[in-house]
Image: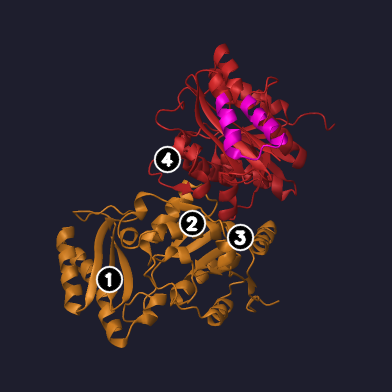
Chain colours: A orange, B red
Amino acid sequence: MPAAVPRSLQVINGVEAMRTAIRDVQRGGETVGFVPTMGALHEGHLSLIDAAAAECDRVAASIFVNPTQFGPNEDFTKYPRPLERDLDLLRERGCEFVFVPEAAEMYPAGYGTSIDVGAVAVPWEGAARPGHFSGVATVVLKLFECVPADRAYFGRKDYQQTLVVKRMAADLNLPVDVRVCAIIRDADGLALSSRNVYLSPDERRRALSLSQSLRLAEELISGGERDALMVRERMLAHLAAAGDVNVEYVAIVRDETVDEVATISGPITIAVAAKVGTTRLIDNLRIG
Amino acid sequence: MPAAVPRSLQVINGVEAMRTAIRDVQRGGETVGFVPTMGALHEGHLSLIDAAAAECDRVAASIFVNPTQFGPNEDFTKYPRPLERDLDLLRERGCEFVFVPEAAEMYPAGYGTSIDVGAVAVPWEGAARPGHFSGVATVVLKLFECVPADRAYFGRKDYQQTLVVKRMAADLNLPVDVRVCAIIRDADGLALSSRNVYLSPDERRRALSLSQSLRLAEELISGGERDALMVRERMLAHLAAAGDVNVEYVAIVRDETVDEVATISGPITIAVAAKVGTTRLIDNLRIG
């Protein structure tokens, strides 16, 4: 069989069937890369599928809009669920297994367990979205148990989430290698997000101020600025100038941590969150 | 090689070495039974080794006095640690792998993750020992990840702990079959516990009131008593008569739950906890 012919995509709903499929592949001496998603796939997700395909023999994904990581006033109900399109995209990119569990199997009656990863989950997204990271950590662990892959792939757009997942994997001795891949952006700089579909054309234009403010910071720092407060002020001014962009936080931290820095030296990450209209957006940039 | 010749016991300290040893056995098509312990082994633990040996091809254990399940005023420091004796006992009973991790590997600097299993962890031991069940659930999950066995064995003496572990395993889709084995008692009825070594001869005599009160309850119920309050009163009177037995709780619940019953019908478990001198003891009995 020529290598270019794509293998077919198996859609698996049950936990045991999913686990068995992965174990069978591994028993044959092949490695599996896993990309957990909430569906509504875009090139960000698909770049993770590509990364998994490049590093592993076989690729698995999951599509599950996890209710426990949404707050009561968040967009769980309206979150986009274009399943058939998602399956087509996964198939085209060479994904061979996709786990699509039912909420009733993931959280049956009597369900009671949650995971807290401590300090990395406390600020920013953790503060703005109570319970969010506990929901994320718990469902990611569950998915890792259902899809016991060798490597798992996460996008760096959710910077704090990558810290949460890496903290959990290290702390709980999980036998999976957590890989973090670069943010994928539209040509105008907007970080890809399943939530971008909520934006009106005018909101989308204003939303560009997030990535622009990060590029501005990069320019300031490459020009010699070392005062984090000063960089932050300039970013906030840029975001304010966009009009009707409600900033939740701009954080300048030592890279791979949530520790804010006063003086910029060594690799940092700048993370920003803002509401544009009713749509909450996040973005970040590693510098140095 | 005759079957009666015991295999040797491998003492493994590192997480990766431990996981590899178990995976190698499973890749060869054999099953592994796992008995997590805090050491100070007695016939209760060894009966779990026997159960694992009866149901699985190979047996693994762990010895780790887990600091996070002890409260600040509990007996972590003085908890007995007779390691060489424990290893001899495991070897004699046919255990082939024992995981003896360092606390510094289990809880390195920056460690932050904990697991909460919800309602089953709230009353009795959960109320008396804040943080205890979170510490238990978390270390048990970590041990399951380090020793990825097919089945894991727990003693029913820690009744609520068995509910906590089963709840966690079900909720987190853990690929391990949690098995619960009967309480082992001394000839006089005292449930075996590593903490029994703390008891003076006089305390030990008074400690018998726990198992006696459970037998009394069994007699009352087999004689037709259906009123849980009445059974509880008679148990408390028996415990009071022993002198200097400080009861923490006597709970009569629907078996396999922490739901207290008013009228006894169908299988129940009665759980009791009391301090005798400075030693905290627990016991329980399934009835019906």
Viewer-nearest of discs 3 and 1: 1
Whether residues under marks 3 and 2 lie with C-beta atoms below 8 angstroms apart, the answer is no
Q: CA distance from mark 2 to mark 1?
A: 26 Å
Q: Amino acid at mark 1?
A: Ala
- The magenta stretch spans which residues? B212-237
Quadrant hosting residue B253:
top right
- Look at the numbered disc 3 and give the secondary structure of its residue: loop
Separation (CA) of disc 2 from disc 4: 21 Å
List the residue tagged with mark 3. Answer: A31
Q: Is residue A32 above or below residue A40?
A: above
Percent of width and height locating residue A79: 44, 76
For the residues bearing labels 4 and 1, Cβ distance under 8 angstroms: no
The local crowd at label 1, few if under 14, some if 14 to 19, many if 20 or more residues have their Cα within 10 Å, is many
Q: Amino acid at mark 2?
A: Thr
**In the figure, is residue A127 to the left or right of A174?**
left
The subunit carrying tag 1 is A
Residues at marks 3 and 4, CA–CA distance in whole angstroms? 29 Å
Q: The disc labelled 4 sits on which kind of residue?
A: Pro
Marked residue nearer the N-terminal end (3 or 1): 3
Q: CA distance from mark 4 to mark 1?
A: 35 Å
The answer to if B235 sits in the magenta stretch is yes
In three-dimensional space, the C-alpha distance between marks 3 and 2, rounded to whole angstroms, equals 24 Å
Question: As shown in the figure, which amino acid type bears the numbered disc 3?
Answer: Thr
Q: Mark 4 = which residue?
A: B108
